Image (cartoon, rainbow, N blue to C red):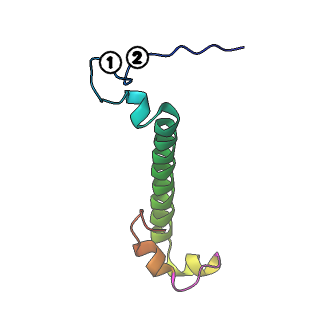
């Protein structure tokens, strides 16, 4: 069984109505935010690498691997656009 202690932080102490740091974002929310940020950066990096790879291929190579002629639009997209 786990016991939890209750602190007086943010509950009418001499600090007034300043919320506790955990009460603003909360540790689970902050961890989720950090995880989401890391996933977004990873996705952007993957797109950037993929698009640079496509840009390095010739039209013949693109045709050979089955990419359509509309690949120019994909190569020109910035990494943050899906």
**57, above or below 25, in the image:** below
- Tell me: 71 left or right of 23: right
Quarter that holds the N terminus: top right
**Dots 2, 1 in contact, CB < 8 A:** yes
What residue sits 45% from the left and 16% below the top?
Answer: 7
What residue sits 52% from the left and 41% below the top?
Answer: 32
What residue sits 58% from the left and 84% below the top?
Answer: 68
**9, above or below 17, in the image:** above
Q: Which residues are magenta?
A: 65-70
**48, above or below 73, in the image:** above
What residue sits 53% from the left and 35% below the top?
Answer: 28
For this orientation, the residue located farthest to the right is 1
Label 2, on which residue? 8
Q: Main secondary structure of the magenta part?
A: loop
For this orientation, the residue located farthest to the front is 12
20, 75: nearer the viewer: 20
Q: Secondary structure at mark 1?
A: loop
Res 13 label? 1
Mark 1: give few (<14), some (14-19) or many (20+) Cα within 10 Å: few
Magenta includes 68? Answer: yes
Q: Percent position (x, y) of residue 13?
A: 32, 18
81, 66: nearer the viewer: 81
78, 2: nearer the viewer: 2
Q: Quadrant of residue 65?
A: bottom right
Q: Percent position (x, y) of residue 71?
A: 51, 79
**57, above or below 21, in the image:** below
Q: CA distance from mark 2 to mark 1?
A: 6 Å
Mark 2: give few (<14), some (14-19) or many (20+) Cα within 10 Å: few
Q: Percent position (x, y) of residue 15?
A: 27, 21
């Amino acid at each position: 069984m786990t016991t939890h202690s209750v602190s007086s932080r943010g509950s009418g102490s001499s600090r007034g109505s300043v919320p506790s740091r955990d009460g603003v974002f909360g540790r689970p929310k902050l961890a989720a935010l950090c995880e989401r940020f890391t996933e977004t950066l990873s996705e952007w990096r993957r797109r950037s690498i993929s698009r640079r790879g496509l840009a390095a291929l010739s039209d013949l190579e693109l045709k050979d691997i089955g990419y359509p002629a509309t690949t120019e639009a994909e190569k020109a997209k910035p990494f943050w656009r899906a």
